[in-house]
Image (spheres, grey):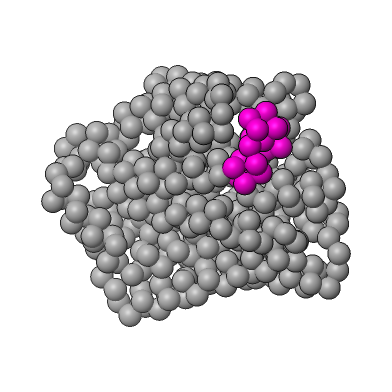
Amino acid sequence: MPATHRYLAAILAALAAIGPFSIDTYLPAFHDIGAGLGASAYDVQLTLSFYMGPFAFMVLWHGALADRFGRRNVILVAMAVFALASLGCAAAPSIHWLWFGRALQGMSAGAGMVVGRAIVRDVFEGAQAQRVMSQVMMMFALAPAVAPIIGGWILALASWRAVFVFLALFGLALLIVSARALPETLPPDQRQSLHPASLARAYLAVARDPVFLCVTAAVAFNFNGFFLYVLSAPTFLVTHLGLTPQDFGWLFIPAMVGMMSGAWLSGRMAGAWSNARTISTGFALMGLAAAGNVLLHQFGAPGLPGSVLPIPLYTFGMALAMPSLSLIALDRFPARRGLAASCQSFLQMLLNTLTAALTAPLLWGSVAQMSLGMAGHLALGAVAFAVSHRLAGRGAVTPQ
């Protein structure tokens, strides 16, 4: 990959990493936030839902805005809002103010992920697009591994409020880098109208495309098989495995090594393997990991390293399949890639929000239940992909 392409991939990966940093960095501080603000464990857990609900809503619009005003302008405004929202979280006098600050973070944090996907397809085609998407994912995968470790050490040196100061500085740094180095990839003559009738037709076209919906559902269900563990990390690691907030690397480092390795293999196989082969191999590896996880915890007690070992294999398979799945979805709407990326991210975040609010609290009571949650999400993802593959095989017409 040329150096200029790697440079762009690094910027896009950092912008996309705002999302996982906003979630994972403050996970080790849950207990301290509750004690400091006089809030219950459930009230603190709701800070995730208050973040992901607005995140899911706004990713539905980031792409449409980027199709109208340009990719770069949307990124700059979003990073400015994120930095200010993070400072508001750091100064929150009550859990209710923290909910509000987290909602503002959520409204702005998704722009990098959504617009970044559109930028990749603006600039690259075919196998090269898969390679760049894989490169972005490899660097992006570092965020969930590094973020909770950074959060744990910040917590060891200062209060939980310092975690949000760190996020504010991160947002500010990305604002400066984007202003200086991020190119505009959508020419003015290719920009789309924000007229309500035009937007309504575009969103309706996406909502009525079964292949797009099924492929997007496959990505979302696959990811939530792992995301369940991210959301449950304080209980999984501290309560069930007896670790400390400084030991969150036991979960996140192996998981992200798996994700980076899967993304690397996806990039290496771009052009050599078909999309179907890449995706099927990813599902096979995820299935092996999920089955082993269920067997281990249905018939054995949780502990290290056994309770963590299936997770990197799962994320390896997930990351191997994800670039191909994402590009299939985006290529359904070549004239509206920004809007398609928004809809893709919205549906994924909607499921993430439901997992945070309902599924994770329901299943985190035992590691055995969490293993069933991973397997169940994967099964739904496999069904969704099988349906999309069958529909595409029948000759579904690509929307324009």
Picture residue at 19% right of the left edge, 34% below the top: 188
* Residue 222 locus on image (x, y percent): 55, 62
**Residue 146, placed above or below residue 79:** below
Q: Quadrant of the C terminus?
A: bottom left
Count of marks, rendered view: 0
Asked if residue 37 is positioned above or below residue 140 in the image, the reply reads above
Q: Residue at x 50, y 75 (%)?
A: 383
Span shown in magenta? 25-45
> How far across and how far down the image is residue 117, in percent?
41, 45
261 sits to left or right of 397: right
**Magenta segment, prevailing SS (helix, strand or loop):** helix
Residue lying at the far front of the rendered structure:
38
In-image side of 375 versus 334 (left or right): right
Q: Is residue 354 magenta?
A: no
Residue closer to the observer: 387 or 156: 156
Q: Is residue 29 magenta?
A: yes
Spot occupied by residue 121 in the image (x, y as percentages of width and height): 36, 47
**Apparent side of residue 377 relative to residue 153 in the rendered image (left or right):** left
Above or below — where is 76 with respect to 355? above
Instruction: Kindly tell me whether residue 375 is visible in this rendering.
Output: yes
- Report which quarter residue 212 is drawn in: bottom left
Q: Is residue 341 left or right of residue 355?
A: left
